[in-house]
Image (cartoon, helix red, strand yellow):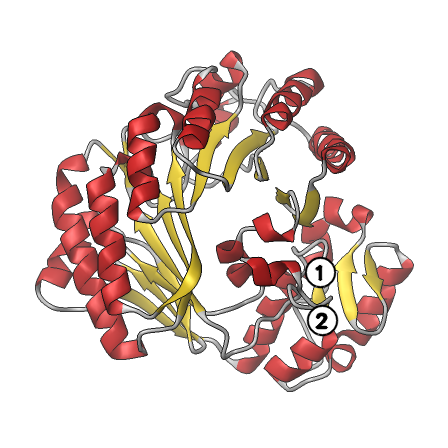
Amino acid sequence: MSTLLAATPTQFAAPQPREAPWGLYIHIPFCRRVCPYCDFNVYARREQLIPAYLSALAREFELVASRWGNGPVQTIYLGGGTPSLLEPGQVATLLDTIARTFVVLPGAEVTLEANPETVDTAKLVGYRSAGVNRLSIGAQTLAPHGLKVLGRAHRPEMPEQAYRAARQAGFDNVNLDLIYGWPGQTREDWLHDLATVLAWEPEHLSLYALTIEPGTPYERGVQRGVLRPLDDDAMAELAELAMDLLPQHGYEHYEISNWARGSVFRSRHNQIYWRNGWYIGAGAGAHGYLGGIRTVNERRPERYIERLHLGELPIQEVETIDPCTEAIETMLLGLRLVTDGIAASAFRERHGRDLLELYGPAIEELRVLDLVEWDGERLRLTRRGVLVANEVAVRFLEPMW
């Protein structure tokens, strides 16, 4: 990680070079219960499938390496679902298998997502010994009524207990997830959540605006009038509270939803996504993107396991990304990088086209509206632009290709 401290001014800007090392995302789709706002590929009460699922993952790694090559891999991310349902020994075996199958670079970032109610100090010591060096704790809120509205399983005191246990286990790179905009949340609720976790001094915070996803119990609750989400003005107020408060505590707003105490503690794995880099997606429903080809795996764990038992890659969808779409995706993803944005030189090297040639009028219009900054090399959102990022992104959907 020390090399990140000496980063050049555009090292973190989008897009990532094609030859950059890959990320490896591993989806663990099992949960004790499914939160009502969640639209991820997750399944409750199927933990009995975990041993067979881990065996299937090992087979998928072999097949992916045979088809695409063995890396190198710079980050490993165990996401879910609830990866902390795995026992430390299972995580150790998984990481050992990865190390035998792929070229994993020295100092690779290895993240595991954990729900507070599923971990204790002993378990976290096991994860740390297995090779996990970054922990992401799904706190979401510390308000009792907020946890109830969000359908979370843990009690208000459990995120701090999990955080303290992580420190005792030797983790020196910890992220906390918080959600804002849940029905009934007040300005005071949000300030309390922020002030409390800031006092703990985690290295990283992910602050996610609640979205009502199609097909979720939350959407049905909104349609019936049982749930009333916050309006856009209220959401913007909560976002701005964080934007005002966190820099006072040494946090850098490096991505729309993410804050780090210096570049060394940014999520290196997620930066691959935002810089439109290559990554393997392993596990049920996982998305991968290698060499301009996007894949989506079988969603159902049983079917995923079955196909790998037959020796098949469990791919359900394949899409070849054409050069124009690739450039558009660089813009949509790269604009999320609040600090670094998109570098014109990197864009030209990756896509073979000039940024102004494709987007000159849009950039100038947005600059006049004070929604983007443009200095001839770097394009990034202003504070105003961050608050209306989706509206800004629409202006980059039709390049002059």
Q: Which residue lies furthest to the right in this view?
A: 368
Q: Look at the picture and state if 249 lies above or below 3.
A: above
Decide which of 298, 394 is in the foreground and name it. Answer: 298
Q: Residue furthest left?
A: 310
| Screen quadrant of the C terminus | bottom right
Q: Which of 145 and 77 is in front in this view?
A: 77
**Residue 134 occupies quadrant:** top left
Q: Quadrant of residue 155?
A: top left
Residue lying farthest bottom?
352
Q: Quick one: SS at disc 2?
A: strand
Instruction: Classify residue 29 as left or right of residue 6.
Output: left
The residue that label 1 is drawn on is 340
Question: What x and y, as percent, mark residue 364?
Answer: 86, 68
Task: Say if 10 sits above or below 217 in the image.
Answer: below
x and y percentages locating residue 243 in the rendered image: 75, 37
**Classed neighbour count for the residue bearing mark 1: other residues with Cα under 10 Å, few (<14), some (14–19), many (≥20):** many
Type of the residue with mark 1: Asp
Q: Name which residue lies at 66% across and 56% down.
A: 337
Image location of residue 27, percent across then percent down: 32, 50
Q: Is residue 3 left or right of residue 114?
A: right
**Can you give x and y, in whole percent of width and height, for residue 208 in the image?**
58, 38
Residue 283 at least partly seen: yes
* Whether residue 303 is visible: no
Marks 1 and 2 close (CB-CB < 8 Å): yes
Callout 2 amino acid = Ala
Q: Is mark 1 on a helix, strand or loop?
A: loop
The residue where tag 2 is placed is 343
Q: How far apart are marks 1 and 2 (CA)?
A: 8 Å
Residue shown at the point (44%, 59%) measured from the top left = 107
**Residue at 64% across / 53% down in the picture?**
263
- Nearer to the camera, 186 or 349: 349
